[in-house]
Each structure stands twice: as structure tokens, then as C-alpha cells.
Image (tube, rainbow, N blue to C red):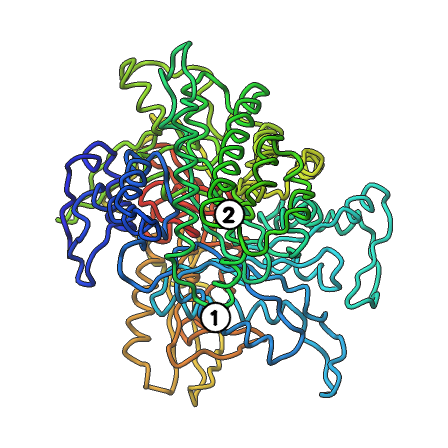
Amino acid sequence: MDIPLAETGATARIAPISRQVWDAKYRLKTLDGTPLDRTLEDSWRRVARALAAPERDPAAWEERFYVALEDFRFLPAGRILSGAGSGRRVTLFNCFVMGDIPDDLGGIFENLREAALTMQQGGGIGYDFSTLRPKGAVVKGVGADASGPLSFMDVWDAMCRTIMSAGARRGAMMATLRCDHPDIEAFIAAKREPGRLRNFNLSVLVTDDFMAAIDADADWPLRFEGKTYRSVRARALWDSITRATYDYAEPGVLFIDRINARNNLAYCETIHATNPCAEQPLPPYGACLLGSINLARLIREPFSARAQLDTALLDELVATAVRMMDNTIDVSGFPLEAQRREAMVKRRIGLGVTGLADALMMCGERYGSLSAAAVAGEWARRVNRIAYLTSAHLAAEKGAFPLFDRDAYLAGESVRELDEDVRALIAENGIRNALLTSIAPTGTISLLADNISSGIEPVFAHSYTRKVREPDGSLREEEVSDHAVRLYRDMFGPEAPLPAHFVTAQDLTPAEHVRMQAAVQRHVDSAISKTVNVPEDISFADFQEVYRDAYRSGCKGCTTYRPNAITGSVLEVKPTAAAPPSLTGPELLLRAEKLTGATYKLRWPDSEHALYVTINDIEHDGTRRPFEVFVNSKNLEHYAWVVALTRMISAVFRRGGEVGFVAEELKQVFDPRGGHWHNGRYVPSLVAAIGDVIERHMISTGFLAMPLLDDTLADDKAVPSRGGLVGPICPKCSQPGLVKEAGCLSCFHCGWSKCS
């Protein structure tokens, strides 16, 4: 049922899209849709009360927590905002790294079960598949060859889709593989195969030795359990990794030796995986608890020569946020007991910042400049310092984390870089939380907080137009502006030209992106989720240099995004005077007397008779494109829905435009009775098998250059929007303008996000 939004207090002061995000994602409601949170203040009060419950004086701390949440100054991660105080059995942790996968069938499928239970509660997961023997290796005792880690990743991928089809929150998974695993080349190329591993982000675990071997142009042995299977040239393997990323944005790169060397807990854990967006490298069963300080709310006298960060308020907020997040560990549920134990003995949290780009604009700093990097680094240093001081004081009050070893902890590489007074307090009191800082993607909560810039990303667009569907079905348009831009024009007038330092993502060089990430990483004990956006016409050599620059600069990983016909454009600004799209829809394509097509024979195990899928094409604007679909079979069991399905598909095809999504939508349909292995891969339903046929046909005719990856549409032809946004189509609202930031896809129009 549609519930009108209560437009009072903070709810009335924020943009309409922010109210809609709150209502759709974070507002507590009954199962029938009746709101229990009438206003945003109700949501803040609910969260504050829940997180204050472990305190000796809950009422006093509830008020302090509420003040921190008020006006979006502290933004807990989405699961805390939606789940804390709801009375429901939910986890308040966003993501997990699962246990090490043993190299035996029983252990593999036990880990699959644990992954399913975790995803059922909405947690994203990370896995290292390096523990599984390579394809073709002998499996002793059964007289067979191993199928390799990629085959089991397919099983995980199918599990994720099945959980999603049951109504669970959209799944997100990270898969890692070591750069010296014998199957690394297959891992790098996995997403070149149509539709494969769509629910995974992929990252290669790159070692310091491998980077040195690249420099030396040396041979690189591929090993498993001490056995060398073969050797490759290190530089050739590096070219394969970066070429795949250049072509279709994956895999990412994690500098795993640096991650472990700079881990406060190196004395008691080894990390070889991260959560899906990579801001939290975690040990087996490690959990990711996130929250962000909104820097955009802390600038005094913005846009003036006296603009500056309110450091006193920042210190107060950080101290309160650390306490809130520490309490969250105690009040949260966990999908698995192993996850609860891991969280309790180390009590790691990931406090970060968001709104950085907006805050820099308010202070007259150009994002990406040397000056802005220095400012951002200093702000991050202050957050890190106060977080560690607070946690040390908490240890005196509530006790240090159970695995705290004073000498080993203080000897850690990152801890040695803390100020001497902080180290002295830790030596005296211990510390409550083993790790404290992280920079997470904050796409949806930043949109909730009046559309501030996300995490430490630059602003993607100063403003854009979104279409909103009214209850009567009509469409209206509204402008959505970046928070800092809107504040500037409120102060200086709606027609005031924006200063030169108001840059957006497309104004930056890759080196400027890396500079900002590196400046903040120096003062973050965990990691940073950030995307380095590069231009489509960047040379391959310059593209490779981005990764070398990130490694030399001290980053713990690197994720890039290059717009192209396969992944789609992240963001493209077109002249605002462009003609608006028709709201009445395109003119239908006309059928000729005779069409060219093909018929495909499709066998499905549940059907006694084969199905014959016929796809006919037309020539339109010099392109061969699908026009109609027929499915015939002697089996009449599915006759009604098959006819309905093909008529609907044909109707979509006849409308013209971008129709590649049809195959993708069909491929995501799951049969609750289970799918089948078909042509060497798992197909979740007969409808999905028909989608496969349609996709293969469109590829064979040249209509699709490649299948769609990561929920984005191939976008060879620009799709105009009155707001100037061009890019992949959102799977929820079907409007162009998806952006990729911090490894996550987010929709400007409706707030949909893949990993929020």
C-alpha cells in the first residue's frame, strides 16, 4: 500500500528523492506497509535507543546518540538504520568474509550452506577460492580429475541467484584468487563468458613478489600446495589482468602483502579476502560493521574565505560514533555462530567519512589537487586519531578486545605510526576495538542525507533530472542537485555560476583519483572502497600505469572503471539543450513481408519433447535486430505461458531501441523446483534457457557485441535524458544513468544500489 510521507521536521527539509529513499529502505513498517516511523526523527530515535541499550545509563547515551544522528551528521550503514530497534531477527553487519574453503567436496558444500544462510539474512560475502586445487589436478581416492575453483564459483553464483529469487535482499559476493594459482588465467577471463559469475565481484590477490617479477620481466611459477604446475611470464600475466579490466572493468587488484603487513592483528590472523566492495579486508568469518561521519555537515562558513571544518564537532562526533558502533557489535544478530565469535574476540569496526567532495568544495578546494589531497589526508588523520583515543578510553571502561596482546599490537606497522600519546594510552589501557577505520561506499545513505557526495568519491554530476511516476500513472520531472551545489545556489542565487573548483568525476585525471585515495589510505587502518574512473580513450599503457601508481602510492588495492560498449558509460554529460525523449513512446517498427531468422532446438530435461525457438530479425538503420520470437513444441503443458511470453517479447522487440535487456531478464528467472545443467553450466529454469537462446542469437547476428555484465546494459548508442545523464539502464526503474563508484552500481533516479 502507498503511505504518504510525513513532511515535517528533517523529513520536510531534504530533497524528495531523499524522502523516497528513507521511505523505501530505512523507514520501519509493519508487514502490511503501515509505517511505524512517522518521521525521520522517529528513525533516529529508534536507532539511538537500540544502540544505547548495552550502556549502564541507556537514557543518557540515547540522547547523545540521537544528537549524533540528527541532521545526518553521523550515518550508520544501511543495515543499522533499517534494522536497529526493529525487533526483528536481523544482522546489523553489512558484509562478511566466509571461512576458508577446504579442498574436499564435503567441506566445499558445507561452506556453500554457510554462504546461503548468511545471504539469506542479507549479508554480502567474500571468499578466497585459492584453497581449491586447479582444474585437472588428481583427486586421490576417487580416480577423477578436479574441476577447479571456477566450477565451484559457478555453484556459488547459482546459489546467490536462488536466494535472490526467494525474495531476499540483492546478493553481493567477492571472489579472490592468488596471482600464483594455476587457474589464475581462467579466473581473469571468467567474465568474458556470456552471463557468467554475474553475482561476483572478482579481485586478484597480487603479491609484492609478483610486482617485483613484473619489473624484472621474470618467469612467474603457478603453484598449488608446493607443486609448480607451469610458469608464465609475469609481465604477460599482468597484461592479462589489466587488459581484462580495461575491457570490462574486472578483475580488481588487491595488494595482499601490504594488506597483511599493515594489519593491526597480523600476529593472530591472515587475510586473503575482502567484503564485496573491498573496503574491509577480513579474516575467515570476519564481519564488516560500517558507519560514516558526514563531513559536508561540519563545514563552518562554507564558500567563504573563512570556511573550515569544525574540528571540535568532528572530534565529538567521532568519539560518539565509535561508542555507538562498539555497542552495535553487542546488539546485532549474526547468521553464524562462527561470525559472532570472530566479531566478539576482535571487535573491529569500520568508521569512515562521506561527503568529502562536497566539504572540499565548500572550503574552496579542487578535488584531486595537491592541496585537496593534503586537506583530505589531515581530516582522515584526525578521524583516525580520535577513534583510537576513544577506543583506548573505552578499554579502560569496558575492557580491551579479548585477543589484545599489548606487545604484539603495539609492534604492528600501522600502530607504530600513531601519535605517541595515543600509543601510550593503548599501552596503559589496551584498546576496545582491534581496527577502527574504513572508507565504505555510501551511495544510498548519502542520497538519504540530502544527496551529499558519496564516501571519498568526487561528485558525479552537479544536477540531473529524474522522472517520478505519480499515483495516477503520469510522469513528472524533478531536478536533483548535489548538496553542495544546492547550498551554493541557495546562498548566491539560482543562476550563480559555479566556481572553477566545483569539479565532477569527468574533470579529473586518473592520477588525481589515485592521489586522493592514497592521501586518505595513509590514515585508514583497514581499506578504502573507491573507483578510479578513466576516460574511454585512455591508452592501454596509461591504464596500466594507474595500477602501478596505486601500488607505489601505498594503496591497498585498485578498482578502475573505463566506459565502453561492454560495461556502459558511467556518466556522460550531454548538452542540456538536447531534445527531450518522447513520453509517448517510440514508433513501432514495421514488419516486412519476408524476414530473416533462425530456429534453435532446445532440450529441457523436464520436457519429453524438444522446444524449437524461432527468432526473426529485421534490418533497421543499417543494423540487424530481433523483431519477433516463436516457440513451438509437441508438449502442450506450457502452451499458454509460452504463447504469452513470446507475444510479450515480440512486443518489446517491435518498440525498437535497446532490447538487449530482454535476454538478461529471462536468464534471471528461477524455477523453485530447481534448474538443470545445460551445455556445461547451470541454467535456473526453462525460461532462462530460452533467454540464453535469444542472447546467443543476438550475439551471432552482431546486435550484441557481448552479453551484459554486472547488471549494466551494453550501451553502444547514447540514451538521452533531459538531465544530461547517459549510461546503463537501471534494472529497477529502467532509466539511464547508473554510475559506478567504490565498486558499486547506483541509480541516480530511484536510489537502487547493488551493494548497499
Disc 1 secondary structure class: helix
Front-most of 585 and 100? 100
Locate residue 537, reporting x and y percent. Answer: 60, 34
Direction bottom: furthest residue:
608
Three-letter code for the amino acid on which mark 1 is drawn: Met
Q: Crowding near pointer 2: few (<14 within 10 Å), some, many (20+)? A: many
Q: Is 202 located above or below residue 596 in the figure? A: above
Image position of 276 (left or right of 627): right
Disc 2 secondary structure class: loop
- The structure residue drawn at horizontal position 53% and vertical position 58%, both measured from the top left corner, is 345
The CA span between labels 1 and 2 is: 37 Å
Image position of 730 (left or right of 62): right
Q: Crowding near pointer 1: few (<14 within 10 Å), some, many (20+)? A: some
Image position of 200 (left or right of 738): right
Front-most of 583 and 129? 129
Q: Is 547 located above or below residue 219 in the figure? A: above
Q: Which residue is mark 2?
A: 432
Q: Is 645 located above or below residue 611 in the figure? A: above
Three-letter code for the amino acid on which mark 2 is drawn: Arg
Locate residue 647, reporting x and y percent. Answer: 30, 67
- The structure residue drawn at horizontal position 28% and vertical position 55%, both measured from the top left corner, is 85
- Residue 544 visible in the current orientation: yes
Locate residue 614, reporting x and y percent. Answer: 43, 71
**N-term-proximal mark, 1 vs 2:** 1
Direction top: furthest residue:
305
Front-most of 275 and 85? 85
Image position of 302 (left or right of 408): left
- The structure residue drawn at horizontal position 34% and vertical position 32%, both measured from the top left corner, is 464
**Marks 1 and 2 close (CB-CB < 8 Å):** no
Q: Which residue is mark 1?
A: 159
Q: Nearer the viewer, mark 1 or mark 2?
A: 2
- Residue 703 visible in the current orientation: no
